[in-house]
Image (cartoon, rainbow, N blue to C red):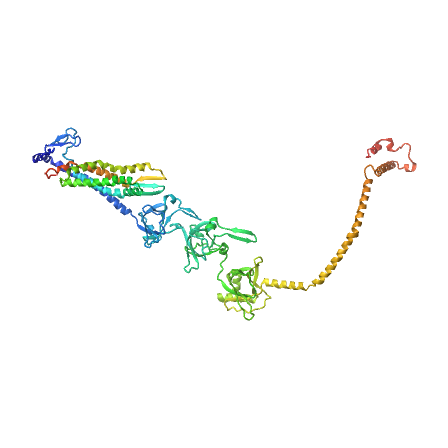
Amino acid sequence: MSAPPYAVELGLQSCHDCGNVCRLDDRECPRCWSVLHTRKPNSVARTWALLIGALILYLPANLLPVMYTDMLGNGSESTILSGVIEFWRGGSWDIALLIFIASVVVPCMKFFVLALLLVTVQRRSRWAMPERARLYRFIEVIGYWSMLDVLVVALVAALVQLRAVSTIEPRLGILFFGLVVVLTMMASMSFDPRLIWDAEKNDARQPR
Amino acid sequence: MPDSLDKSDAPHADAGQPEIRQRRARISLVWLVPIAAALVGLSMVVQNWLSAGPRIAVSFITAEGLEANKTQVKYKNVVIGRVTDIGLSEDRTRVIASIELNQETEAFTREDAQFWVVRPRIGAGGVSGVDTLLSGAFIGADPGDAKDTRREFIGLEEPPPVTFGVEGKRFTLRTGDLGSLGVGSPVYYRRIPVGQVVSYALDDDGKGVVVRIFVNAPYDGFVTDDTRFWNASGVDVSLAADGFKVNTQSLSAILAGGIAFRAPNYSTDTEPAAENHAFPLFNDMRQAMAPDDGPARFVQMRFDQTLRGLNVDAPVEFLGVPIGRVVSVNLDYDEHSQSFPVVVGAVIYPNRLGGAQDKLLAQINSDDEERNARLIQVLVERGLRAQARTGNLLTGQLYVSLDFDRRAAAVEFDPHTRPLTIPTIPGSFDKLQEQLQAVVDKLSKLPIDSLAGNLDDSLSELRKTLEQVNGSVLPQLQSTLERAEQTLGNANQALAEGSPQRQQLGDTLKEVHRAVRSVRVLSDYLSRNPESLIRGRGSDTAPASFKGGATSRELNTEPQ
C-alpha cells in the first residue's frame, strides 16, 4: 500500500472544531472539550433529509409569486421564472441570465451534485473520486450565491415604496426560496467529503 | 487493520446502551426537516385546493384592456377573481376570458349574474371609470339570485344600470318609438331623478318598443296603476292666452333623453303598482295627463268642397271640445253629380265627452257599439252636422267641427252602416265666400258712371269758387289788415310816455281828485253842521281842513 495510512488505522481521530488530533479512544477533545467523531455523525442520513426537505420546498418557491409589483395601480405578481421570462423578453438577457443562474441553475446543480455524492458514497463507488471531491468544494462555494434572489427582492421591496405611484412587496415564494437555499447549504455542510475517500478501503462497513 | 477497528469498537460495545438511544433520536430529528417541508407543501396544496373558487368563462366582443393573469374581477371594488386566460371562441366572433373566481363566490355563477368590462366611459349621463385609465381595465361583476348556476356567461358591453341588491321595482313601458331614450336614461319624478332605463327592445311584431325601467326605492311607491309615464326628452314650447311657455326637464334630460312619471291629480289610487306592471309611454306630459280616451270610434264625413288645409291629425271638435282627430282625407267620385267629394275619415273618442256621454247613453238601451251609433243618430236628428272650419287664418289650416245647425236640411242616417257617416254642411269659409259674392254683386249694381260725372261737375264748381276767393277777397283782406295796423300804431303813439294826451289826462285826473276831496270835505262838514245848508256857514266854524285838528289830520293822511 503506497498510500499513507488512515487516521483510524493509526488509532487517531481529529477534532471537528479545533482540528486537534486525538486518540481514537477519547470521547472528548482534550483541548476544546467537544465531542469527537471519526466522521461527521450520521452524515449521509442528515444530508439526505435536508436535501429532500429543500427539494420539497423548491416547488412552492418556484410556483408561488415571489414579488408583487404595483405600477400606477396596475398590480401584478411574478414568480421567479416569469420574472426571468419578462426580463428576457424585455431585452435584458444579461439580467435574465444572472437571475436564471442564481435561482434555477445553482440550486438545481446542488440538488443534483449532492444526490450524486450521496448515492456514490452509499454505494462506496470508487468512480472519479477526485472530481467528486472537487464538485463538493465547488457547490459549497457557489451555494450562497443563490441568496442573490432573496437579497434582490428584499432590497427592491425596501426601496420602492412610492405609495400610489409604485410599490413592490415580497410574496411568500421568496420565503420558501430562502429556506431552500438555507437547507441546501446545511445539507452540503452536513456532508462529510471524507466519506468519498472511504470507498478506497475494502472494508464494507459503514463508517461512522 | 481489523484489529484496530475491533479495538475501536470495544469501548463502544461497553458503553453501548446510550449510543443506541442517541442514534435513534438523531435520525428522527433530522428527518423532521423533510417531513416538515412536505407538510408545509401539502398544507399549501390543500389550502389552494380548498380556496380555489369556481372557474367560469365570459365572452366579450373584444378583449381590449384585458390581460391574462393580470385583469382582475371586482365586485364593489373588491377583487373576487382574475382572468387566467383569454382566447377566441370557436367561430372567432368573440373572445372568451377564462376567469378563476375566489372562494365563496358562488353567487357570481348564478344564471343571472352579469359581467362587463370597466373602461373609462364618457357619455351624456356623465363620466365613469376614470380610475381605470391608470390601473387598466377590470371586469366588473354583479351577482345574481337565480337558482341555477352555469359556467359560461355572455359579457355585457355596457355596465348594467342597475346592480344587484338595489331596492326598487322594474316596470315595462310601451311606446311607438324609442325617441332619444337609451339604456341609462334617467327617470324623473317631479324632476327628481329616481331611476333609469334598464333596457329596451322591439315588440315581437316590430310594431312598438318595450322600454324597461327601474325605479329606486323608496320612489317606486309613487308608481301606482294610475301613474302616467311620458317622454321628457324634449323641449315643450307652448303659446297660450297667458303667454309663451317653455317647459323642459333638466338639461341632461334634453341631451340624453329621459322619462317622467306622475299620477294625475284627480287620481285617488295610492296603491303602489306591482313589479313589471306595463304602462303606456306618452309623448308629452299633456297627453299623459289627459283622462283616458277609451276606445276610439271611426266615422266618415263627405264634403262637397275643396278641403285644402285639412291635414291628417287635424282635430275634430264637438262644440269646441276636441273629441278626435282626422285620420284620412281621400277623394271619391260621385257618378250622379259627376263631382269629386272628399271623404274624411276620423276617429273620435266618445269618452272625451265626459259626463255628457254618460247622460246621453243612459237614455239609450243597447249594447256598447250599438249605443254609440244610436247616440250619433239622435244627435244627427237634432241637427248635428260636420263642417270644415278654418282654424288658423294665417296658415289656412282646417279642422272638422261637429255642431248643431237647426236650419240644416234633414238627412237620412243609417245607424247600421259601418263606418258611420256623419252628414256635413258647407264650411264657414264657403259661407264667407257666398257673402262676399253678394257684396260684390251689389257693388256692381251701383251707377258708378253717373256718380262719377256728378262728382266731376261738383268738383269744377268748387274750383271756380276757390279761384274767385283767391282773386278778389284775399287782396281786400290784406288792405284791411294794413289799416288796422295803422290804427293800432296811432293808438300806441297817443298812449306813449310824455305825449300831450297823457299829460292832459294826468291833469284832468288831478282836477278830478281835488273835486272829489272838496266834495268829501263838504259832506263831512254837512254831516256835522247840517244847519249850514239853511243858515250858511258860521264864522266860527271854518272847514276842518283849514283849521287843522283831528279831522284835518285825518284828511291829510289820505293818499295823493
Q: Quadrant of the C terminus of chain A?
A: top left
Q: Residue furthest top?
A: A31
Asked whether B139 or B538 is in front, the reply is: B139
Name the spot of residue B321 as percent of width and height, x first.
54, 59
State which quadrant residue B447 falls in: bottom right
Asked whether B270 or B497 is in front, the reply is: B497
The residue positioned 74% from the left and 58% from the top of the image is B458
Asked whether B125 or B218 is in front, the reply is: B125
Image: A126 above or below B456: above
Q: Residue furthest bottom?
A: B336
Asked whether A29 or B376 is in front, the reply is: A29
Image: B39 above or below B308: above
Name the spot of residue B412 as percent of width and height, x first.
55, 69
Res. A24 visible in picture: no
Name the spot of residue B253 as percent of width and height, x first.
47, 50
The residue positioned 92% from the left and 36% from the top of the image is B535
Image: B83 above or below B317: above
State which quadrant residue B558 falls in: top right
Left or right: where A76 falls relative to B255:
left
